[in-house]
Image (cartoon, helix red, strand yellow):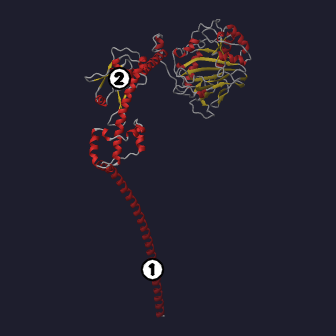
Amino acid sequence: MGKSGNGRKLVQTDNASKHDNLIRENEKQMSEAAMDELDTRLQRLENANSGTTDVYKFAFFFFMGVVLTILIYPRVSSTFGTTAVHSRDNLQAKKSDSGFNIEQIDEIEELPSEESTPAGEKRTEQNKTKTAGDTPKYKQNIENEDLVKKKVNKREVKTESAERSKRDEEKGNDNEQTHKNNEKDITMEELEEEEGEPVILKREKNEDLMVDEFEESNAGDTSEDIINNEDNAEPRRVELFSGNVEDIASDLPIEIEKVSTNQQKPDQQKKKSQKTSKSSKPSQAKSKDKARKKNKKEESDPTTNQNVPKEIRDFKATYQKTLTPKKVFVDGRRIPPVELLPQKPNNSSVKIWLFEEFLSDEECDGLMRVHNKHVEEQSTDNPILCFDSVSTLRKHLKNVGKRVQVTSNDFTKGTTCVNASFSGQLKEWFKGNWSYSTAFYPGESRFATAFEQRVKQAMGLNPENGGKFQITSYPKDIGYKSHTDCTENSDDKRDRMATVLVYLDTVSEGGETEFPELGVWARPRKGRALLWNNMNPAGDCEPMSIHKANKVIDGHKFILQRWYYYKSFYSLGKRPPEPPLPERKPGQPRVSCDEYEHGSCRWYDEWNFEHMIEYERQKYTLV
């Protein structure tokens, strides 16, 4: 039993050792395989890196070769005397740019080289020992180019001199000395001597010629001379004046005097003075335009016009450029601003704000009561009708079906209003189809002061930039056509920047204030206020602010308006004196009909100067 037990133990030990050996062999084989795989991958990575390095090396050496070529080539070229050889097409283009003609090149191309410069003669004698085939082609081209330059230059000088003489003969100049001087040719040597001399400007003392005379006698001349140099193929311009010619020649004609012992030839002095006078004409015209603009600006600016009273000259204008609406509390009412967003895409700066219950019912009722009473009191007499043009009157007559011949003689002299009898006839034909407006001014009532302070707090509008307060009523079937409250394409900043409109009563149907370009509209509701800007912050009228008052279908519409101006002026917000024309009864109202397509007729209880022709002519120069 002891031996058999020991034998089993030995067998188990051998089996365990064999198992361990197998495991170690497997691990060794796996490690060798892993090492082989790792070596393979490292080899691939090394090959890839070596390829990238080769590319970088190639790029580096290529770049260095280009740099060395750029640096070394000019020196090699100058050392061996290499010159670019021009083809005939390139030569033709070059000559055409320099003022030469290809036909002239063909004529002179066969001339011998003995007529060239002395250096060219020596070169010809030295080249006699050589055959024609020994001379490089590019040197022949260079010699031909030099020959072309010289011959064409001489021909142009002679041609200019012949044309000058011919012009003098046609003008019938009786001055023989001047004629002889004009016949003399200016040699190239004289021009080269004068080229480097300094020049000074000297005013003519004994010459009193008008600019127009210079213009007629020197038509076609310029303020520059073209000098052809034998050493340069292209003509070179030499300016006679160093600086602005117009500034120099603004007062008197100017001549050029060389600083040398030899005086200029009379014909040269005359020609140069004529050239200068020609350039002085546009300068004088420009000076006149500047003076005219300056005078116009001084007339339109009250601060520079000495005929204007001192209090007007000392007036300091204020500017209203933006709107700043915010929430306010009035008599326990909370009044927040509500922006009416455009329903159509646009790129304008026009913004529209709505304020509910901006005025109380008592305030609205009081304003309507005063307005109706005033209209009734002044309606005892027929109004005088005024139109912005004869065309507007004709269109209104056509609208009511009346065929009446109308001329400017039907208007009161100096005005755009017709006489009283014709106004009465027009009232019957138009059937009183117009709106009614009454006005009051700052300081004339307690309400005016309270209202402008409320507007300042809620809308950010300065009272100093506000105009009159206007109450307008629209009977049934009356509205107002599309219009802007500002003047488009106008440079005058004294224009309506913002509009404040308050509905004094609720309208059952119709009477909406509509902005067609923005897709915004508001219905009349008692106490509701609208605020919008007509101009952008730069002071330009916004075309997108165009709006209209739709016709009243059912009810009666009442509104209170006040316009605020971009730039204030002295008479803004002050009741103006009534004009003397046209002749009328005391308290007689007027009806003003604006442009037919963009306005309507409106009844007014006051007179201003808008119907005066002289006022319209000087509208932007008055205060």
Vertical placement of residue 70 versus 336, above or below: below
Q: In the rendered structure, which amino acid carries the disc numbered 2?
A: Asn
Amino acid tagged 1: Glu
Whole-percent x and y of residue 54? 39, 61
Q: Which mark is residue 599?
A: none
Between the C-alphas of marks 1 and 2, the distance is 120 Å
Residue occupying the far left of the picture: 261
Circle count: 2
Rendered image quadrant of residue 229: top left
Of residues 461 and 482, which is closer to you in this image?
A: 482
Q: Secondary structure at mark 1?
A: helix
Crowding near the residue tagged with mark 2, few <14, some 14–19, many ≥20 C-alpha atoms within 10 Å: many
What is the quadrant of residue 206 in the picture?
top left
Residue 158 percent location from the top left of the image: 36, 29
Q: Which residue is mark 2?
A: 182
Question: Is any part of residue 269 visible from this angle?
Answer: no
- How many other residues sit within 10 Å of disc 1, few (<14), some (14-19) or many (≥20)? few
Q: Which is more toward the observer, 23 or 532?
A: 532
Say above or below: 539 vs 588: below
Left of 176 or right of it: where is 516?
Answer: right
Which residue is rendered at x = 28% and y = 28% of the image? Answer: 197
Residue 93's place in the image compared with 559, above or below, is: below
Q: Nearer the viewer, residue 225 or 526?
A: 225
Q: Nearer the viewer, residue 54 or 521?
A: 54
Element class at badge 2: helix
Instruction: Kindly identify which numbered label has been placed on residue 25.
Output: 1
Please tell me which of labels 1 and 2 falls first in the chain: 1
